[in-house]
């Protein structure tokens, strides 16, 4: 079903003048996936030679090198995240390879998770979003806004490994399905598969007090998608960031590879389902970057954050340099197959919400006139 983004010109309403965009959008559905704190370096270079043999961050360097290290960076990135680096690069677009004239950044002044997710979902950095423990988000996300539109009502859902997503999306106000942290899947059908996932949430060790394993998040999200058939889905995977904070570069790499495998499996599932086949755009991004050296790769924070909220990092007076650098990948019927995109001027995280709405044929200015502009290079 093809739609045009339309904007009615108020002063010409009497003659029903319509201004239509030159862009036609084919897909009725959208999936947005975020990978918490996955660096652009691994995405475009593969495993980091500085870290893959580091005694402090790796338990078995010989095994890790065998799994992830190859002769060239291109080979290394393809073995780490093959779906993103091969399938999406060949059939879609990637932004943010700073080795290849790609520059994408956060526009918020904090460079950590809640501000980043707020920026992704609302299209605008909010200086008042200055903590990961803020409580319900006062800002409206594009998910909430879409749910208020008749054609999307009841067809929007969000899933997150971190238990903060009920606040980030503001579940109570938004009125959409939000399943995060250690929530059970409560949707129908309560079949054997979903019951097993719910049992594992209770029975598996809780490695972190507020983040469940991504396999559980993905399993519940996939079950919901295949049975409830939503039109818009947001999935936030989190293991990569938590393993990085733990100083486990080996587990960070394994988590990134699993995330890529989940994305591949979801894409194949979508293409085997009538509602979604050739009718769904997929956007993948991150909430923030990380440091680029062995002494700071575990962390992410701006100078403003290290001097305040994250003062345990106050030794880093310039913040964690480079942790504002992010990346994005996209594939689908409306995404031009252009591979790695180059840009002369920086692109920003605040453009993702408008891009999501554009891909659904919606006018982002009706959502938030102050949001960053859509990433037109994905569709032109």
Image (cartoon, grey):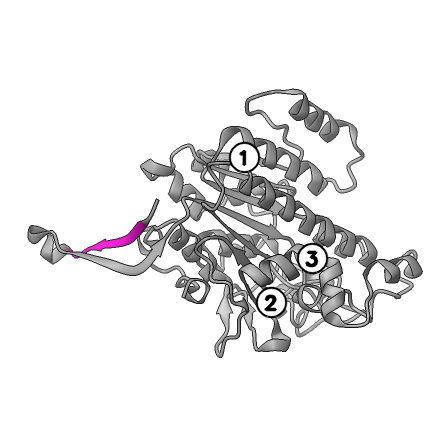
Separation of residues labelled 3 and 2 (CA atoms): 25 Å
Sequence-earlier tag: 3 or 1: 3
Name above or below for residue 274 compared with residue 54: above
Q: Is the Cβ of the residue at disc 1 closer than 8 Å to that at disc 2?
A: no
Q: Which quadrant holds the N terminus?
A: top left
Residue beneath disc 1: 225
Q: Secondary structure at mark 2?
A: loop
Q: Secondary structure at mark 3?
A: helix
Q: Which quadrant holds the C terminus?
A: bottom left
| Residue 246 location (% of width, % of height) | 80, 53
Q: Main secondary structure of the magenta part?
A: strand
Quadrant of res 217:
top right
| Residue 21 location (% of width, % of height) | 28, 60
| Residue 273 location (% of width, % of height) | 52, 36
Separation of residues labelled 1 and 2 (CA atoms): 32 Å
Residue beneath disc 2: 324
Q: Secondary structure at mark 1?
A: helix
Sequence-earlier tag: 3 or 2: 3
Task: State the extent of the magenta-drawn residues as a range.
Answer: 3-9
Residue beneath disc 3: 82
Residue 92: say if magenta: no
Quadrant of res 23:
bottom left
Quadrant of res 319:
bottom right
- Few, some or many residues within 10 Å of mark 1 (<14, 14–19, 20+): some
């Amino acid at each position: 079903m093809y739609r045009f983004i339309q904007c009615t010109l108020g002063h010409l309403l009497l003659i029903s003048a319509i201004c239509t965009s030159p862009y036609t959008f084919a897909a009725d559905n959208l999936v947005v996936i975020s990978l918490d704190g996955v660096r652009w370096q691994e995405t475009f270079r593969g495993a980091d030679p500085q870290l893959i043999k580091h005694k402090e961050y790796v338990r078995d360097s010989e095994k890790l090198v065998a799994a992830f290290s190859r002769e060239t960076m291109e080979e290394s990135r393809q073995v780490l995240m093959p779906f993103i680096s091969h399938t999406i690069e060949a059939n879609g677009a990637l932004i943010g390879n700073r080795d290849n004239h790609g520059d994408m950044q956060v526009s918020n002044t904090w460079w950590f998770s809640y501000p980043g997710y707020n920026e992704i979902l609302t299209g605008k950095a909010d200086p008042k979003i200055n903590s990961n423990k803020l409580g319900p988000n006062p800002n409206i996300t594009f998910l909430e806004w879409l749910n208020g539109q008749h054609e999307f009502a009841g067809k929007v859902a969000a899933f997150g490994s971190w238990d903060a997503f009920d606040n980030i999306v503001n579940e109570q106000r938004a009125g959409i399905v939000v399943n995060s942290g250690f929530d059970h899947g409560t949707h129908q059908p309560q079949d054997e598969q979903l019951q097993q996932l719910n049992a594992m949430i209770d029975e598996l060790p809780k490695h972190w007090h507020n983040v469940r394993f991504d396999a559980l998040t993905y399993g519940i999200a996939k079950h919901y998608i295949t049975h409830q058939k939503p039109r818009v889905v947001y999935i936030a995977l989190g293991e990569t960031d938590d393993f990085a904070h733990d100083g486990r570069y080996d587990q960070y790499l394994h988590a990134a590879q699993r995330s890529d495998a989940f994305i591949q499996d979801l894409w194949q599932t979508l293409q085997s389902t009538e509602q979604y086949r050739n009718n769904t755009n997929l956007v993948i991004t991150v909430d923030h970057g990380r440091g680029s050296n062995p002494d700071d790769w575990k962390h992410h924070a701006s100078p403003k954050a290290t001097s305040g909220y994250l003062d345990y990092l106050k030794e880093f007076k310039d913040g964690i340099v480079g942790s504002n650098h992010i990346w994005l990948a996209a594939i689908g019927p409306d995404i031009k197959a252009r591979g790695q995109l180059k840009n002369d001027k920086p692109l920003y995280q605040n453009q993702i919400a408008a891009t999501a709405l554009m891909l659904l044929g919606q006018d982002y200015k009706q959502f938030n006139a102050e949001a960053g502009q859509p990433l037109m290079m994905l569709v032109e």
